[in-house]
Image: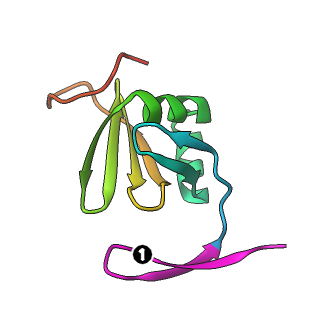
Amino acid sequence: MEYQSAIAGPVGGVASVGPVKPKLFWSAVLRLFITVSKHAAGQMAQRNVSTTLLKTILNDGKKTTRNGVAYVRYGNYEARVNASTGNVITVVKLSGGGGGGGGGGGV
């Protein structure tokens, strides 16, 4: 059985309808329960990012927020999360060059 929910998004007031996602864990950095979309889960699998690593990023990383998206950096990884819903948009491994910026220890 698939459950449906309608959620008015904070960005542009766009409504979306989709299955309810189970809450995976609480993020201390974002102060939200975290969910992962099928799209993000597929990307994580392709990039060898485990749920354990995602949890580490979102609990120990450094957060910046722009346009309703929280960017949480930890080591060479960055998770991008909807700052209102806690839904993970993507997780990327950052290249070694350029940019200063935060993050906790290495992974």
In magenta, the rendered stretch is 1-18
Instruction: Indicate the quadrant containing the C terminus: top left, top right, bottom left or bottom right.
Output: top left
Residue 3 sits inside the magenta stretch: yes
Above or below: residue 34 compared with residue 73:
below
Using the rendered view, name the quadrant where residue 104 is placed.
Answer: top left
Please state the horizontal and vertical placement of residue 49, each as a whole percent of the image: 54, 34
Using the rendered view, name the quadrant where residue 26 is placed.
Answer: top right
- Specify whether 54 is left or right of 98: right
Q: Nearer the viewer, residue 31 or 51?
A: 31
Q: Residue at x 51, y 37 (%)?
A: 47
Please state the horizontal and vertical placement of residue 28, each as a whole percent of the image: 46, 37
Q: Residue at x 41, y 27 (%)?
A: 60
Identity of the amino acid at label 1? Gly
Above or below: residue 44 compared with residue 8:
above
Q: Name the residue under label 1.
A: 9
Residue 19 sits inside the magenta stretch: no
What crowding class fits label 1: few (fewer than 14 Cα within 10 Å), some (14-19), or many (20 or more)?
some
Please state the horizontal and vertical placement of residue 87, each as a whole percent of the image: 50, 56
Please state the horizontal and vertical placement of residue 21, each as a whole percent of the image: 65, 61
Using the rendered view, name the quadrant where residue 91 is placed.
Answer: top left
Above or below: residue 58 compared with residue 87:
above
Instruction: Indicate the quadrant containing the N terminus: top left, top right, bottom left or bottom right.
Output: bottom right
Q: Nearer the viewer, residue 34 or 37?
A: 34
